[in-house]
Amino acid sequence: MKTTILAVFSLLLLESCEDLGGSAANVLSELPEVVLTQTNYLPNTIHTILPTRGRLQKFAQAYAGNYSESLKQSLAAYAEQQACVLGLSRTEFARCLAATGQQDPSAIALIYRAERARYDLRDCWVLEFACSHSDPASLGHYRCFVIDVATYDVLLSITCR
């Protein structure tokens, strides 16, 4: 079932990313990881855990030179769909994603990991993005956000600069 859902979504992602100019292998080489955990991140240690560097490096390499708004929206839609597969609220995820500001067209950012967890005992989404400050061909920077699911406030923002 999970493989079927992924295959169907991959086809939809391919169709929606026609402006990438890259091959299908480049388009679908990495998808966001979406997980539900019992982790309770603490303010004094979260900076040593985030970002998830292995995933960041894979995304930066996979999509270097292939960035587009269509790809950004497709990856975000995939992450939202995966949250639903986990039995989580689509609306909650979408509102937390919007709270990051990374879906704004001026932000060069691709979501690569989403974790429903806790931060200092508060339910949250931890959202991680591969990003660039100015050049869409280079996605080696990161932004991580901890979003409170009750208020949709940004509890923490971590960037490489």
Image (cartoon, helix red, strand yellow):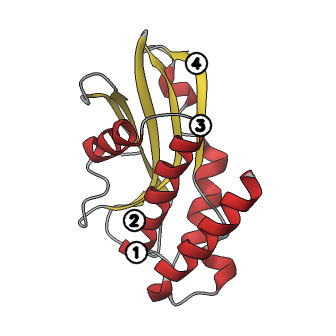
Which residue lies under the disc numbered 3?
Answer: 86
- Marks 2,1: beta carbons within 8 A: yes
Disc nearest the viewer among 2 and 4: 2
| Image spot of residue 151 (x, y percent) | 24, 24
Q: Helix, strand or loop at disc 2?
A: helix
Q: Residue at x 52, y 57 (%)?
A: 78
Q: Residue at x 67, y 48 (%)?
A: 54
> Label 1 is placed on what type of residue?
Ser
| Image spot of residue 1 (x, y percent) | 75, 52
Q: Residue furthest front?
A: 1
Distance Cα–Cα, label 3 vs label 4: 16 Å
Q: Which mark is residue 39?
A: 4
Vertical comparison of 85 with 73: above or below: above
Distance Cα–Cα, label 1 vs label 3: 24 Å
Distance Cα–Cα, label 2 vs label 4: 28 Å
Distance Cα–Cα, label 2 vs label 3: 20 Å
**Residue 136 visible in the displayed image:** no
Which residue lies under the disc numbered 1?
Answer: 70
Give whichever of discs 3 and 4 has the lower sequence position. Answer: 4
